[in-house]
Image (cartoon, rainbow, N blue to C red):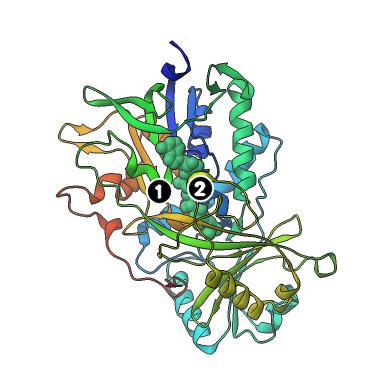
Amino acid sequence: MVASGPQAQTVRADAAVIGGGVIGHSIAWELQRTGRKVVLIDDAPGTGASWAAAGMLAAVSEYHYQEEELLDLMVESAGLWPGFVKVLAQNAASATGYRTTPTLTVGASAADRTALLDLRRVQVERGLGVEPLTIREARSREPLLSPGISCALDTPGDHQVDPRLLVAALREALGRHQGGGTAVEGALHGFALPDRAAALIHDGGRIAGVRLSGGGEVLAAETIVANGLQAGDLAGLPEGLALPLRPVHGDILRLRVPEHLRPLLTATIRGLVHGVPVYIVPRTDGTVVIGATQREDRLAGTGSGGTASGTATPMAWTAVSAGGVYQLLRDAQQLVPAVAELELLEATARARPATADNAPLLGRVGSAAGDIPGLIISTGFFRHGVLLAPVAARICRELADGEPDPRWAAFRPDRFSGDRPPPAAARPSRHFPLEHQESR
Ligand SMILES: Cc1cc2nc3c(=O)[nH]c(=O)nc-3n(C[C@H](O)[C@H](O)[C@H](O)COP(=O)(O)OP(=O)(O)OC[C@H]3O[C@@H](n4cnc5c(N)ncnc54)[C@H](O)[C@@H]3O)c2cc1C
């Protein structure tokens, strides 16, 4: 390290990871376990979309018509989850909230039933495990489900994790491996640099690191751009590279279940209520998460957090929509009437980093001379960033090792750039019935 004052600090590392959401932390952890020295740059880690996420690992339930490559990626990642949490548990005492409880999908109306059974036909054609239950079977498993539901489907392979706990556990593991969280290099705390990335540093034809808004720099063999929606704002991105990210806002609620109603549910409930999706995710701590709206409005935030209960998150502020909260509580109560008796703890909103084809921007970036060395992009995870974290981490590690898996070339981040013909994953897709874009 060369340092001539805090503003001019130069840190050298094997890998610089820009962005400390669930994606950046997972990549940093995977790279660190190969023996690399990793620096993770974020002055507000864990406060972006990852702060809001329900943590459903729903490769099957989140399948959308015609998104076949994305389905492959989701299924691959779902298969990595048990090993991912096992290794993490060996390196961090903090729990992750990972649970292998199943998901039940239920409909409210006859039309919801038709839509869900149509979707199931396609899911089964793709080899995905979704089994119909009678209403009686569903209610014997989940007695607080409304007797008025129109159908129930069991998806045993869709599980859950608690994203806030997960990020905390990843930070603990990263800290244990590299400096234990102590100030080892000026502003660098172990693996963590609480600063913002301002610009990529170019050195000839390669990316050599990142310049920080605080004045310092990180020089690294690999720079991984994993700062979610803000990825396109970095100065010095390769010329002509378009990272077309757009915010899709979501409102989400956290509620406490009173003792006499516990457990409210044992499975995650995903519902379709007159065409509008809603889900209820039960946690082990006696709370449930109810989400999530999807809106592309520009409801301005005027507070200090995007969390109605007041957690301060300066950069990620998204206003909570009153209509969104109303809709979530209304629809969740229709499926599980006892929701009306819960204590509302928190209403949060965040923006999902979405792309035109709903698939991530993940991989290296091409130039006339071939792929640009030293640069990996990993963003645009939209509704699936928690589910996809282990596979994103593995793909970045394979790229850093010089052993890219050709199966994932369809997700190249430069697929929207220049005159390149869009690969298969960039085909426009039809939304499936649970994908309801609401305008509230
Ligand atoms: C309401 C809601 C519910 C969701 N539910 C689920 C779910 O059940 N399952 C699922 O798989 N996914 C879910 N998602 C999607 C998931 O949350 C996202 O896909 C995922 O969190 C994206 O992670 P990320 O690390 O890319 O981005 P983020 O979590 O947004 O993290 C980006 C980080 O980059 C940092 N940053 C920004 N700019 C800079 C800079 N210049 N320098 C340094 N750092 C910077 C920010 O501070 C932030 O910490 C949900 C999303 C929402 C909004």
- The kind of residue tagged 1 is Leu
Instruction: Confirm whether residue 366 shows in the render.
Output: yes
Answer with mark 1 or mark 2, whichever residue precedes in sequence: 2
Distance from label 1 to label 2 (Cα)?
9 Å
Find disc 2 in the rendering and name its residue. 48
Give the residue displayed 24% in from the left and 43% down from the top: 241
Query: Callout 1: few (<14), some (14-19), or many (20+) C-alpha neighbours within 10 Å?
Result: many
Which numbered marker is on residue 212? none
Q: Is ligand 1 less than 8 Å from the beta carbon at label 2?
A: yes
Where 181 sits versus 300, above or below? above
Please identify the quarter of the rendering in which residue 10 is found. Answer: top left
Query: Callout 2: few (<14), some (14-19), or many (20+) C-alpha neighbours within 10 Å?
Result: many
Q: Is ligand 1 less than 8 Å from the beta carbon at label 1?
A: yes
Where 213 sits versus 341, above or below? above
Where 371 sits versus 182, above or below? below
* The N terminus: image quadrant: top left
Find disc 1 in the rendering and name its residue. 229
Q: How many labels does the image show?
A: 2
Outermost residue, right side: 260
Please identify the quarter of the rendering in which residue 96 is found. Answer: top right
Residue 349, percent across and down? Answer: 53, 58
What kind of element bears circle 1? helix
Give the residue displayed 48% in from the left and 64% down from the top: 62
What kind of element bears circle 2? loop
Residue 413, percent across and down? Answer: 30, 45
Seen from the viewer's position, the closer of residues 360 and 216 is 216
Give the residue displayed 60% in from the left and 20% down from the top: 179
Q: In this view, does 204 lie to the left or right of 32?
A: left
Residue 333, percent across and down? Answer: 66, 77
Residue 219, percent across and down? Answer: 38, 21
Q: Is residue 322 left or right of residue 371?
A: right
Q: Are marks 1 and 2 in contact (CB under 8 Å)?
A: yes
